[in-house]
Image (cartoon, rainbow, N blue to C red):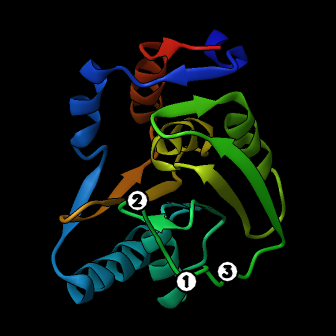
């Protein structure tokens, strides 16, 4: 994974459409329906680790009482400032990750955060959307990454070797900036 040593990777236009498609199972519906489906998925699959990417997903999982190992958020939903999240975590990392990029700093923070005991969070100055990809790569097999799909619902990504390879392939195809 040579790309892990690159300071900044930029998402080119041709990959944007590929990432608009859900990377896992899309849980569709209104807020109540999605909440019900999320609880049902957790009870059914009993994932070893849950990673939440996004403010809305993070607050929803907290509200539902679902244990999350790692929260990744930027205090914005659809690029609009949100209310400060009230997360019960042991540590909060703060990283810079501009929109449309993956920074080395953010990648390292995800890797380190997953080593901590208990729940931790990464507050992103910039945008957290693309951090779903390294979250998939660094999550253990059998874990789940949950993120919001704007105006559609929530995506449940069960971590498999195939999902990891897909995420690695996307990152390898991103442009090197720094």
Camera-nearest residue between 128 and 91: 128
Mark nearer the viewer, 1 or 2: 2
Residue lying at 57% horizontally and 14% vertically, measured from the top left: 177
Residue at which label 2 appears: 79
Judge whether residue 46 can be spotted in this image: no
State yes or no: discs 1 and 2 in contact (Cβ < 8 Å). no
Camera-nearest residue between 8 and 110: 8
Residue lying at 32% horizontally and 83% vertically, measured from the top left: 35
Residue at which label 1 appears: 62
Camera-nearest residue between 32 and 12: 12
Give residue 38's position: percent from left, percent from top: 35, 76
Q: Residues within 10 Å of mark 2 (few under 14, many from 20)?
A: few
State yes or no: discs 3 and 1 in contact (Cβ < 8 Å). yes
Q: Mark 1 to mark 2: distance in Å?
A: 21 Å
Give residue 169's position: percent from left, percent from top: 42, 18
Q: Helix, strand or loop at disc 2? A: loop
């Amino acid at each position: 994974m040579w790309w892990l040593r690159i300071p900044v990777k930029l998402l080119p236009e041709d990959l944007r459409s590929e990432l608009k498609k859900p990377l896992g199972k899309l849980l569709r519906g209104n807020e109540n329906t999605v909440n019900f489906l999320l609880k049902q998925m957790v009870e059914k699959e009993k994932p070893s680790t849950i990673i939440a990417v996004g403010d809305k997903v993070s607050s929803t999982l907290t509200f539902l009482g679902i244990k999350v190992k790692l929260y990744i958020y930027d205090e914005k939903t659809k690029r609009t400032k949100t209310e400060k999240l009230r997360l019960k975590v042991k540590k909060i990392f703060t990283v810079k990750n501009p929109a449309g990029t993956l920074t080395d700093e953010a990648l390292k923070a995800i890797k380190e955060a997953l080593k901590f005991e208990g729940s931790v969070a990464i507050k992103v100055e910039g945008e957290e959307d693309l951090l779903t990809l390294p979250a998939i790569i660094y999550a253990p097999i059998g874990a789940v990454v949950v993120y919001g799909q704007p105006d559609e619902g929530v995506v449940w990504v069960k971590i498999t070797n195939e999902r990891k390879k897909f995420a690695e392939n996307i990152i390898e195809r991103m442009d090197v900036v720094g």
